[in-house]
Amino acid sequence: MFGGVFGGGSQKPAGQMAPGGMGGGMGQAQMDPNAQLAAAEQEMEMVTDMFARLGDLCNRKCLIQRYSDEELTKAESVCTDRCVAKYFQVNREVSEKLAKLSQTN
Amino acid sequence: MYNNYGASYQEQWLQQMMEQKQLKDFMRMYSNLVSRCFDDCVADFTSNTLNDKELTCVNRCTQKNMKLNERIGQRFAEENAKLMEDQAKMGR
């Protein structure tokens, strides 16, 4: 499960960490290896944290029927999908807004 | 410090770090799960052992939360991939 997340989700970052450069991710051809590793660690921290928050938030918001069944009900499944999608959208909106705000300052 | 070592060292280090983080993350998830299922299921303190209803509830709670995490993981990977694509397109 977690292997799936890190395998699927961070395959691209790991690929970008290939020796010799960051590739299309950071837009810098030659980066100090120390900085590369630090950046990779940072990114991993963020991803882990994000996943934990998602788990907590979507549990609170979507698992309303308290354990009537072992399986996820259809409603809960759909709610979870939407929960993750909306979370990512909020993530994008906030980062865009912050970027704009920091520009005008 | 790492400049003297080859790329394989970096990859190894990264691999090790990933494994450590995954382990730490799993431990944290486990603790949270126990906490949550206790909080949601246990309310009767007339006895010091779980009654049948509570046992069933705890079983379902565990199952359900594991399935939820699995599903979130799948959607997360999809969304993350999309995000990476968008970033690449924008030429970041």
Image (spheres, helix red, strand yellow):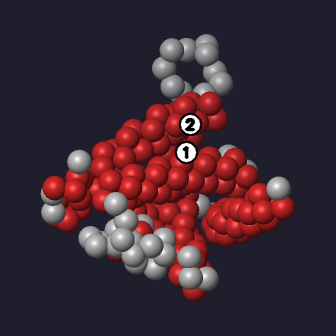
The quadrant the C terminus of chain B occupies is: bottom right
Pick whichever, A9 or B84, lies toward us: B84
Left/right of residue A97 with respect to residue B15 in the rendered view: right
Left/right of residue A53 with respect to residue B17 in the rendered view: right
Labels 2 and 1 touching (C-beta < 8 A): yes
Quarter of image, res A82: bottom right
Instruction: Kindly identify which residue carries mark 2.
Output: B37
Q: Residue at x 36, y 49 (%)?
A: B22
Quarter of image, res A21: bottom left
Query: Element at badge 2?
Result: helix
What amino acid is at disc 2? Cys
Pick whichever, B2 or B63, lies toward us: B2
Subunit that carries the residue with mark 1: B
* Disc marking residue A18: none
Query: Element at badge 1?
Result: helix
- In this rendering, the count of numbered labels is 2
Q: Residue at x 44, y 73 (%)?
A: A28
Q: Between marks 2 and 1, how big is the CA–CA gap?
A: 6 Å
Quarter of image, res A71: bottom right
Eyeballing the image, is A10 above or below B56?
below
Q: Residue at x 58, y 36 (%)?
A: B36
Left/right of residue A39 with respect to residue B38 in the rendered view: left
Instruction: Kindly identify which residue carries mark 1.
Output: B61
What amino acid is at disc 1? Cys
Q: Residue at x 42, y 44 (%)?
A: B25
| Residue B90 image position (x, y, % from top left) | 61, 82
